[in-house]
Amino acid sequence: MEFNLNKMIRPHLAGVKSYQTLRDSFLDKKVVFLDANENPFGEFNRYPDGDPIQLKMKLAEINQSKTENLFLGNGSDELIDLTMRIFCEPTKDSILIMDPSFVMYEIYAKMNNVKVEKLQLNSDFELKKDSFLNTISKSQAKVLFLCSPNNPTGNSIDDLEFYIQNFTGIVVVDEAYIEFSPEDSAVNLLSKYPNVIVLKTLSKAFGMAGLRIGVGFASPEIASLFIQLKPPYNISSESQRLALEQLQNLEELKNNISIILNEKENFRVGLETISSATKIFPSDANFFLIKFKDAELVYQKILKENILTSLRHPALKNCLRISVGTADENSKLLSALSQI
Ligand code: PMP
């Protein structure tokens, strides 16, 4: 069946015009700006670029994509929310998510009054083709969220393309952790599938969580829709400037990823010696999901040593999700764990 984007968009949005920043067409000219009620004084008095072209060019280059395929969010969180606001009619439409997966899909669905359907994973948190086909044969979902590597489990989806191929609505592939993983990015599949949106972020492998920059990739039509419907100046001027500055040192950022991956391996070897840890799930991300005999007890004991881990996902009994830190931080954690 041919994908028709216009049939996917919430009907009332068809005629909605976004906020137009008048100055976009004057940026390269010497103009006195009296159009946006700014204060003429101060270091940060001007609104930022609404569609940060410099940053987008750099991100397109890094991701072997094109600026017309790219849109930015205040974190990929904002892009998840916008996806639902653009495509899902409150009380009528539903999204389909893996269970467990990133908690914000469900939280934004609730905030937008959108229904949630769940894809069962097997006991190793893998998505399986037969169970997927069975679920979608009964599903009305408009948007499928696939998270690979998945948070909080850490594993990647095997044969991601199969799931994209078999879903007729919008498929969001959340690749927040892809740079840590050996898998190829789904950005490579965009030319083949007009219904795909890939989400990446500068918060994880690029080490810029404080700047709040999420990066979306899709067809130029979907990308312009997001640009048109996003909040007007969603990336602050300082975030744009600092992100560009950081991305000039790509080699250093890549080197940090290698350091984290080395530490991850040392950490895993250390975890194997911890008797209370009964299972370490395979991870392609910068964290491990670990099963303990009594996760609550472990969580509290290591918290007493001033180490905070995550015990949040309701679908995961007796599991902690632990990020890979520096060599020092990891050995502090391993030593706290070995006391239990
Ligand atoms: N997707 C996944 C899978 C995540 O784990 C996170 C953050 N924990 C996000 C999206 C949101 O990232 P950000 O808003 O920082 O870009």
Image (cartoon, rainbow, N blue to C red):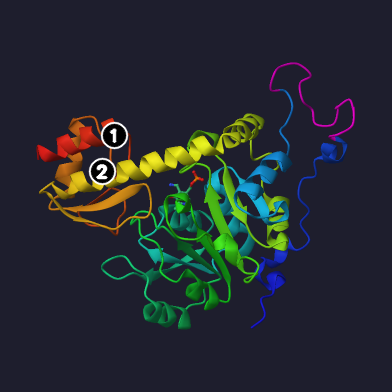
Q: Which label's residue is closer to the chain start, 1 or 2? A: 2
Pointers 1 and 2 in contact (C-beta within 8 Å) = yes
Q: Amino acid at mark 2?
A: Asn
Nearer-the-camera pick, 288 or 182: 182
Crowd band around label 1 with a 10 angstrom C-alpha radius: few (<14), some (14–19), many (20+): some
**Residue topped by disc 2:** 266
* Secondary-structure class at tag 1: helix
Residue at image x 69%, y 74%?
A: 4
Dot 2 surroundings within 10 Å: few (below 14), some, or many (20 or more)?
some
Quarter of the rendering occupied by the C terminus: top left
**On residue 289, which mark appears?**
none
Residue sitting at 37 percent across and 70 percent down? 127
Q: Which residue is mark 1?
A: 327
Please give the name of the residue rendered at 44% of the width and 58% of the height, measured from the top-left corner: 106
- Image quarter of residue 335: top left
The correct choice, above or below, for 36 with respect to 131 in the image is above
Q: Main secondary structure of the magenta part?
A: loop
Give coordinates of residue 46: x percent, y percent. Answer: 74, 27
Residue 252 versus residue 276: which sits nearer the camera?
Answer: 252
The Cα–Cα distance between marks 1 and 2, rounded to whole angstroms, is 8 Å
Q: Which residues are magenta?
A: 27-44
Between residues 236 and 68, which one lies in front from this camera angle? 68
Q: Is residue 261 left or right of residue 248?
A: left
